[in-house]
Amino acid sequence: MIYTTNNSIFPDQVVPEEEKKSFEYGLKVGNAIEQEWFRNNSGQNRFSYNFQNFNRLRLYARGEQPIQKYKDELSTNGDLSYLNLDWKPVPVLSKFVDIVVNGMTNKGYEIKSFASDPFATQQRTDFAFNALRDIQQKDNIEELAKLTGQNFYASADPESLPNDPGELDLYMQLNYKQSVEIAEEELINNVLDFNKYEETKKRLAYDLTVLGIAASKLVLIYPKVLLSIM
């Protein structure tokens, strides 16, 4: 049996899973959502209230709020003939909004990809082992190269290797990069640039600052990925 609790227009959630899958239960949920957002006996629904409230907050943030309430406070029985004032609002809030938004949108990071699959891990281990061997045996390898004219280095670029084995860990973190990691970083950055991510991020930060809420929608259109603001 599907019923509604006393404090909610939504049907009871503590029901068997089979009952939740029924058409009747889904219809109850849909009607409750419609009543909550678009129909209200008091005359103002949640959607209209949020729409008007967000519009009012944006006007205040831009310094374009209605000035009638200021006139009502300063007028004498509705008469403003004795007042010679500039009623244009001073955009004080907009300066603080810009400061907060700029602080939120400053990109203090970079996209870094790290391959952790078994094949990539084995490649990284082999590279580190060969690099350590070349560092430790550098003198012997160079001596053999002088005698035989052959290259006995296991690393592709031994000149870039550090001289101290203790610096190998730092070298691996700063300089070693696999091709799949580079490709992944380029792909992510390309998607962000194509979707104008910085501009979208700034608009999201603006809504978070002014409205207290922000949302975006991800649209997948093969072979493109589009990020649109909501």
Image (cartoon, rainbow, N blue to C red):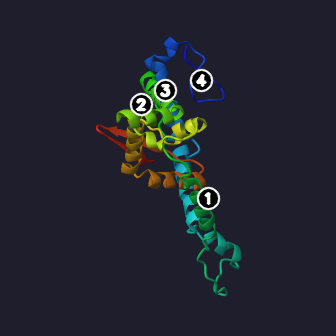
Read off the residue under disc 1: 100
Crowding around mark 3 (Cα neighbors within 10 Å: few <14, some 14 to 19, many 20+) is: few
- Closer to the camera: disc 1 or disc 3? 3
Disc 1 is placed on an element classified as helix
Say which amino acid is labelled 4. Answer: Thr
The residue under the point 43% across, 19% down is 23
Question: Mark 3 or 4, which is nearer the eye?
Answer: 3
In the displayed structure, 14 sits above or below 30; it is above
Which residue is depicted at the point 35% across and 36% down? 149
**Which numbered dot is residue 125?**
3
Q: Residues within 10 Å of mark 1 (few under 14, many from 20)?
A: some
Read off the residue under disc 4: 4
The amino acid pointed to by label 3 is Thr
Q: Nearer the viewer, residue 22 or 54?
A: 54
Does the residue at mark 4 contact the one at mark 2 (Cβ under 8 Å)? Answer: no
Q: Which amino acid type is marked by label 1?
A: Val
Q: Position of residue 200 (x, y in %)?
A: 46, 52
Q: Which residue is mark 2?
A: 154
* Left or right, 124 with reference to 101: left
- Whether residue 76 is visible here, answered yes or no, is yes
Which numbered disc flags the more N-terminal residue, 1 or 2? 1
- State if disc 1 and disc 4 touch (CB < 8 Å): no
Q: Which residue is at a point 62% across and 74% down the rendered structure image?
A: 90
